[in-house]
Amino acid sequence: MPEWFIQGGPVMWPLLIFSFAVSVVTLERLFFWLMEKQRRDDKLVSACLRQLLEGQVDEIQRLDAAHPDPGVRMIVRGVNELPQNPASRIENLAVNELQRMARGQSLLDTVITMAPMLGILGTVLGIIESFEVLNQSGVADPQSVVGGIAEALITTAAGLCVALLALLPFNIFRSIQSTEIIRLETIGTDFLSAIQSSGLFDPAPKE
């Protein structure tokens, strides 16, 4: 290990674990969103909605309910619920997609909060140790005390660096997730509007 890491004290180890966890989650989420972008099929979604407006569901029913695009899955599974109300089915699918997209974000959020606090804790412990040295040696060797305080500040810097390492991907992935949620909400609204306009589903209770 580098000398500065050893000088930081025991708090550096959980910070190292945090940085490793952040790197793993960032790479996994990056791969996830790149794959989601490739799986998106906006043309097929638009075609399905046009068919619903025309009251045609045969071609949609032939599509795979496990289609890679969550928007297409929402439409197919909603059609399979007809003539029953598909709203609850669509809502459940949206909740599942939200959980899938948000995976790993709680860890990043935790690191953003805890890493600086651990860094400050390490600094406080280092300063306490420096004052103990001062108490034992008096003012005969103030340089050792100053050096000890400087070393203690390493953990604060390390904690802030780890937090920044988590903050950037957290904000990026949350922004991408918000965009995808808006897309799914739009598809769900357009789907319900299409099946009502075409008469495939009548929300009014039958007497």
Image: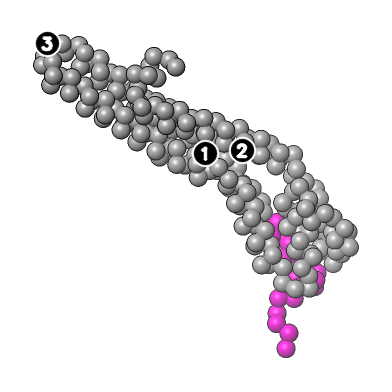
Q: Which mark is residue 170?
A: 1
Considering every residue shown, the one lying at the far bottom of the view is 207
Pointer 2 or 1: first along the chain? 2
**Few, some or many C-alpha atoms within 10 Å of disc 3 (few <14, some 14-19, many ≥20)?**
few
Up the image or down, 3 lies above or below 60; here it is above
Kind of residue at badge 1: Phe
Viewer-side label of 2, 3: 3
Residue 145, position as x, y percentages in the image: 20, 17
Q: Is residue 142 magenta?
A: no
Left or right relative to 158: residue 166: right
| Residue at x-position 68% and y-position 62% | 90
Up the image or down, 53 lies above or below 205; here it is above
Q: Is residue 187 magenta?
A: yes
Quarter of image, res 36: top right
Mark 2 → mark 3, Cα distance in angstroms = 55 Å
Magenta region: which residues? Answer: 185-207
- Please say whether residue 167 is visible from this viewpoint: yes
| Residue at x-position 61% and y-position 47% | 101
Colouring convention used in this rendered image of the protein: one colour
Pointer 1 or 3: first along the chain? 3
Q: Secondary structure at mark 2?
A: helix
Identify the residue position indicated by label 2 in the image: 29
Kind of residue at badge 2: Arg
Quarter of image, res 64: bottom right
| Residue at x-position 13% and y-position 19% | 136
Viewer-side label of 2, 1: 2
Q: Secondary structure at mark 1?
A: helix
Residues tagged 1 and 3 counted as in contact (Cβ below 8 A): no
Out of 122 and 102, give the one closest to the viewer. Answer: 122
Q: Secondary structure at mark 3?
A: loop
